[in-house]
Amino acid sequence: MLMLNRALPRVMWGYFLIYFGIAVGQFLLFTLMRDITLSYFISALLWAILLVYTAQKVPQRRAWLIFGLLGLFTKTIWIIFVQTEVISDYSLMYSAAQEIVNGQRDYLSWIYFQRYPYQMGFTSYQALILSIFNSVGFLKFINVLWCVVASLAVYGIARECFSQRVAVLAMLLHVMMLPILVLSSVLTNQHIAIAWLYIGIYLWLKAGWRSWLIAIAAGIALAIGNAMRPIGIVVIAAIVVIATTFLY
C-alpha cells in the first residue's frame, strides 16, 4: 500500500507530461496549417497566467465552493443566452423520453434503439427528469449541475493524487474549460456520465484500496456512469492496470 501511495503520483505526473506534450505538438501542428499570429500565443499565455494567479489567491479551503459557484454561474448564463437546438441523436433520445413520460411505447420500434439499446439508460434518465419538470431548459440546467459535480470530482481526484494547490488549479481549469462550457447547453449524455465516472475514480482513490464498502460505492458510481455512456470499461481497465502493476 505504501509503495502504491508513493508510485501513483509519479505515474500521474508522467501521464500528464505525455498528455501535455501531445497537446503542445497538436497545437504547433495546427499553427503551421493556419495563419496564427503572435497575439494568439500572448493571449493564451496571459490567460494561463491569470488562471494560475487566481488559483493561488483564492482561499485554499474554500476554493471548491468558490469555483463550484463560478462554474454554476457561468454555465447557467450560457444556457440562458445560447439556445442550442436539440438535433441528431439527442433529438431522438429526447423524443423517446417524452414518449416514456406520456406512457407511449412507439420508440421501441425505432431502428436507432434497436441498434443502440445502450442509449436507453440516458433516455430513461431524461424521462425521469422530464416527469418532474417537462422542459428542455430544465434538462439543460441539470446538465449544468452535473458539470459542477464533475469539477468537484476533479478537485477531489487531484487532491488525492497530488496536493491541495494542484487540486485548486485543476478544478479552476476544469470550470473554465471552453468545450465543457459550450456543450453544457447540449442535451448530451457525456455530462452525467463523466460526473459519475469521476466520482467512481475519486472514491476508489480515496479509500477503495482499504474499504470494501467504498470499493462497492466506487463500482456503483462507475456502473451508473457506464449506463449513461458505455465507456466505463476504460476506467476499469486503468484501475486493473494500476492494481496489477503496484500490488503484485
Image (cartoon, rainbow, N blue to C red):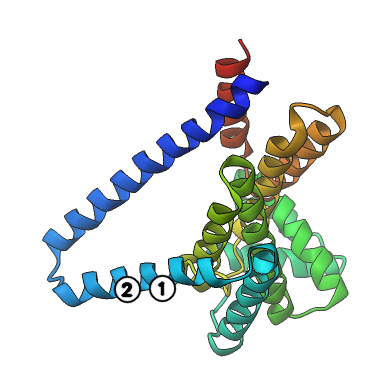
Pick the quarter of the image with the C terminus: top right
Residue 189 relative to residue 178: left or right: right
Identify whether 219 is placed above or below 32.
above
Can residue 237 be seen in the rendering of this structure? no
Residue 17 image offset from top left, x and y in percent: 36, 41
Q: Amino acid at mark 2?
A: Leu
Distance Cα–Cα, label 1 vs label 2: 6 Å
**Along the viewing direction, whichever of 26 and 224 lies nearer the viewer:** 26
Q: Which residue is mark 2?
A: 46
Residue under the image location 71 percent in, 48 percent down:
199
Residue 120 image offset from top left, x and y in percent: 72, 51
**Along the viewing direction, whichever of 94 and 61 lies nearer the viewer:** 61
Label 1 element class = helix
The image quadrant of residue 49 is bottom left
Q: Residues within 10 Å of mark 1 (few under 14, many from 20)?
A: few
**Along the viewing direction, whichever of 139 and 7 lies nearer the viewer:** 7
For residue 50, which numbered disc appears in the image? 1
Residue 223 relative to residue 75: left or right: right
